[in-house]
Amino acid sequence: MAAGRRLLTIATGGLAAGCVPAGAPAIPLFGAYFPSWLACAGIGILGAVLVRLVFIATGIDDALPIRLPVYVAVAAAIGFLVALMAFGR
């Protein structure tokens, strides 16, 4: 029984290895901590809107068969890129 308990301790310890005491990245804004993922999502959405305006101006928007998934993917890509560049995660 002791060997099983030891194995369980090692297995669950490996699951918590990614946790750090520093906490989640946050941006201090007006005295409160604003979650960085929310800022990255907002920047991604604004970036997708700008990409859409460029696509409309160049005529690429008319050639897209399914626009919504394309622009959602563009927003996600921009948001992930901002998170990677700004916070290294």
Image: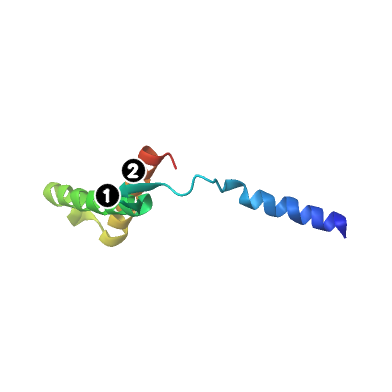
Mark 1 or 2, nearer chain start: 1
Q: x, y (%) of residue 46?
A: 22, 52
Label 1 close to label 2 by CB (< 8 Å):
yes
Which residue lies under the disc numbered 1? 43
How many numbered circles does the render carry? 2
- Quick one: 85 or 18, which is closer to the camera? 18
Q: Residue furthest front?
A: 31
Q: x, y (%) of residue 56?
A: 14, 52
Distance from Cα at disc 1 to Cα at disc 2? 8 Å
Q: x, y (%) of residue 29?
A: 28, 49
Which residue lies under the disc numbered 2? 82
Q: Residues within 10 Å of mark 2 (few under 14, many from 20)?
A: many
What label sits on residue 8 in the rendered view?
none
Residue 67 lies left or right of residue 12; in this view the side is left
The residue located at (36%, 38%) in the rendering is 85
Q: Residues within 10 Å of mark 1 (few under 14, many from 20)?
A: some
The residue located at (45%, 49%) in the rendering is 24
Q: x, y (%) of residue 78?
A: 31, 46
Residue type indicated by callout 2 = Val
The residue located at (34%, 47%) in the rendering is 27
Q: Secondary structure at mark 2?
A: helix
Q: Secondary structure at mark 1?
A: helix
- Quarter of the picture containing the N terminus is bottom right
Residue type indicated by callout 1 = Ile
- Quarter of the picture containing the C terminus is top left
Color theme of the render: rainbow
Residue 86 lies left or right of residue 4; in this view the side is left
- Quick one: 28 or 7, which is closer to the camera? 28
